[in-house]
Amino acid sequence: MDKESCNIWDDACKQLKGILSRDIYDRWIAVIKCIEISGTNMRLAVANDFYKDWLEENYFPMIRKAVMVVSGKEIDISLEVDSSCFGNDHSQPAPEPSFSSISIPNPFEKRQSNHNLNPNYTFDSYVVGAANQFAHAAAMAAANSPSRTYNPLFIYGGVGLGKTHLMQAIGNHVVSKKPRSKVCYITCETFTNEYIDALQNNNVSAFRKKYRKIDLLMIDDIQFLDGKQRLQEEFFHTFNTLFESHKQIVLTSDRTPSEMAGLAPRLISRFEWGLVTELGKPDVETRTAILRKKADLLNLNVGHELLDYLAERVSSNVRSLEGALIRVATFMSLTNQKVDIQKVEELLHDLLDKESQATVNVEIIQRTVAEHFDLRQSDILSKKRSKDIAWPRQIAMHLSRTMTNQSFPVIGEQFSRNHATILYAHDQVSTKARDDRGLQQTLAILKDKVNKNCAKASS
Ligand code: ADP
Ligand code: MG
């Protein structure tokens, strides 16, 4: 095959690797071979019908999109079964290691015990606040009287907000009270892979038996079922069997059942039979309490002032908050140094930048800039052209571009201007700031104020 064809497919694979989890990539994408590209046709091959069906059913649109993105054109892709390309064992070269940065292991995420439960994820170590008290109470009820309160219990919420922790707390609680009960925690991804293995090895009856005799079944990240019809069908029957025999089912997801567009209506309605409950973002007091608890559990000697600072600055999710604490504590123990807030800012600058980008919005920038220049926000949005208004307005436009990840047209809409006006303002301010110390200082002060206002708004 010519070099260009190889490159397109290799580049598409790189794209897919960035989107899919390692497991899925290895299982489904690394097994595809590109046999030819000619003009706008691409021929891909897999070793057997099973791969072909599954890929077509689940990953084809994604593959098509990746190929289109890297080639810059619409390409017709056909997927063929051609076992001759794959030798006897159908094996593929191992994919390259991922390039993600080296991370410090998170001691809270150690997984142990034969139920696949992390022993640290208990109700005791879970901090309750306004955003999670209802979900917490429901989880406690399900743990204390499985299948008699909320069945299924469906917990949904954003990434890193404590779904897995709360779900496993139910499991740990049940195991501690009734060590003989059959408790199973599994991610939906692993559940899927086991099912596929069972299909491939003609072992589906063993798979069914395993999952249909469990007392407490917890499936994490059930949104993974979205759009996978065969798997939904299988899960539907497992669900019914367990439900009818009064076994507790707990599910988590990043969205509500009805927001899963590719979920069969009969599953949506079953997921809604019990209780659907949300985990929200914790407020600053809860974040502080979580950090204190984590620092205690890990015996970390980090002063309260620093913990409060982290809780204030890292508001997007608890996982990032925990990551920040662990980074600071690791630095302290490796260097034997106490750290101050300035040092923390240096250590965590990438994380803090991401936090600001996640929370900064144009509206807060407009308000902050108006306040700073003693104007009203409506002046910033008005058509007035006097210099004492036009210049702050341009500064607000420039900050909107540099402090949020938004495009010029999107920012334009929020100023009721077109994208060219924002682009022009951004250029004007950037050019002037290059050799105007006063302006540099003003921008630094404004950024700081914007960040503070954002932290206030999100807590
Ligand atoms: P999710 O499953 O929603 O992505 P996790 O359950 O994995 O989130 O939580 C991420 C981290 O944050 C875990 O280490 C967990 O212990 C911690 N965490 C989240 N919420 C809380 C809380 N309310 N109290 C204590 N720790 C929490
Ligand atoms: Mg989770």
Image: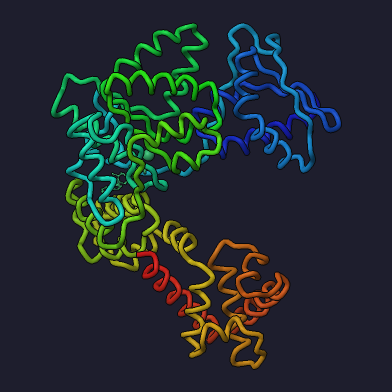
How far from the left and from the top, in percent, is residue 82? 71, 12
Looking at the image, the residue that sits furthest to the right is: 39
Nearer to us in this view, 226 or 52 = 226
Vertical arrangement, residue 259 with respect to residue 9, above or below: below
Ligand 2 is located in which of the four quadrants?
Answer: top left
In the rendered image, the quadrant that contains the N terminus is top right
Nearer to us in this view, 347 or 263 = 263
Nearer to us in this view, 446 or 365 = 365
How far from the left and from the top, in percent, is residue 220? 38, 33
Q: What colour scheme was applied to this rendering of the protein? A: rainbow
The quadrant where residue 238 appears: top left
Looking at the image, the residue that sits furthest to the left is: 177
The quadrant where residue 211 appears: top left
In the rendered image, the quadrant that contains the C terminus is bottom left
Residue, x 17% and y 19% (percent of image)?
A: 180
Residue, x 32% and y 45% (percent of image)?
A: 162
Residue, x 40% and y 43% (percent of image)?
A: 103
Vertical arrangement, residue 457 with respect to residue 331, above or below: below
How far from the left and from the top, in percent, is residue 366? 53, 77
How far from the left and from the top, in percent, is residue 125? 20, 44
Q: Is residue 427 left or right of residue 114?
A: right
Nearer to us in this view, 329 or 369 = 369
